[in-house]
Image: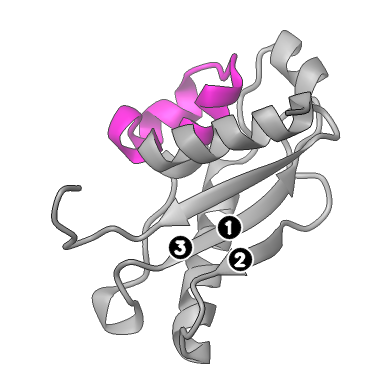
């Protein structure tokens, strides 16, 4: 496993737990010092689409690259969404993820993390697990 793949895996794992670990306010005030904290901060900013415009159980993945200062470099790229989702539901999820990124950035990276992650893409997965048993 390459370092890049390991970073992506960590972001996916910790991003899924992010909403449990940080509130949106905490994500904006606390310094982000680790890869795990990047995932938590991004996850804490996400608000899924309203139930009438969504399908619980949907997964969506976006590829994001950051600058040293915590800004998004270029445009985030959607790389996966659960198959079989109607176009209007797909668009609602893509908009909710784009809004989350807009709310979150710039992430307050520590200088060390900023230097380490600048230019490296992160795969961030968002899971709409509302109403699912065992969550």
Q: Residues within 10 Å of mark 2 (few under 14, many from 20)?
A: few
Q: Nearer the viewer, residue 110 or 125?
A: 125
| For the residues bearing labels 2 and 3, Cβ distance under 8 angstroms | yes
| For the residues bearing labels 1 and 3, Cβ distance under 8 angstroms | yes
Q: Which residue is mark 2?
A: 80
In whole angstroms, how far apart are the C-alphas of marks 2 and 3?
8 Å
The residue located at (74%, 9%) in the rendering is: 112
Seen in the picture, residue 75 relative to 52 is either above or below; the reply is above
The residue located at (82%, 28%) in the rendering is: 118
Q: Position of residue 97 (x, y in %)?
A: 52, 60
Residue bounds of the magenta highlight: 18-41
Secondary structure under badge 3? strand
The residue located at (76%, 24%) in the rendering is: 3
Secondary structure under badge 2? strand
Seen in the picture, residue 87 relative to 33 is either above or below; the reply is below
Image-quadrant location for residue 58:
bottom left
Q: Which residue is mark 1?
A: 61
| Mark drawn on residue 59 | 3
Does residue 32 belong to the magenta stretch?
Answer: yes
Image-quadrant location for residue 31:
top right
In whole angstroms, how far apart are the C-alphas of marks 1 and 2?
5 Å
Q: Residues within 10 Å of mark 1 (few under 14, many from 20)?
A: many
Q: Residues within 10 Å of mark 3 (few under 14, many from 20)?
A: some
Name the quadrant of the N terminus: top right
The mark that comes first in sequence, 2 or 3, is 3
81 left or right, relative to 113: left
């Amino acid at each position: 496993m390459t370092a890049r793949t390991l970073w992506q895996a960590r972001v996916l794992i910790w991003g899924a737990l992010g909403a449990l670990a940080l509130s949106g306010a905490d994500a904006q005030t606390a310094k982000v010092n680790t890869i795990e904290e990047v995932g938590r901060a991004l996850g804490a900013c996400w608000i899924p689409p309203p139930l009438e415009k969504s399908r619980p159980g949907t997964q969506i993945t976006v590829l994001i690259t950051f600058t040293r200062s915590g800004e998004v470099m270029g445009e985030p790229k959607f790389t996966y969404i659960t198959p079989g989702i109607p176009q209007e539901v797909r668009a609602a999820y893509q908009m909710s993820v784009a809004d989350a990124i807009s709310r979150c950035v710039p992430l307050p990276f520590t200088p060390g993390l900023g230097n380490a992650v600048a230019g490296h893409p992160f795969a961030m997965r968002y899971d709409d697990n509302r109403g699912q048993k065992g969550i």
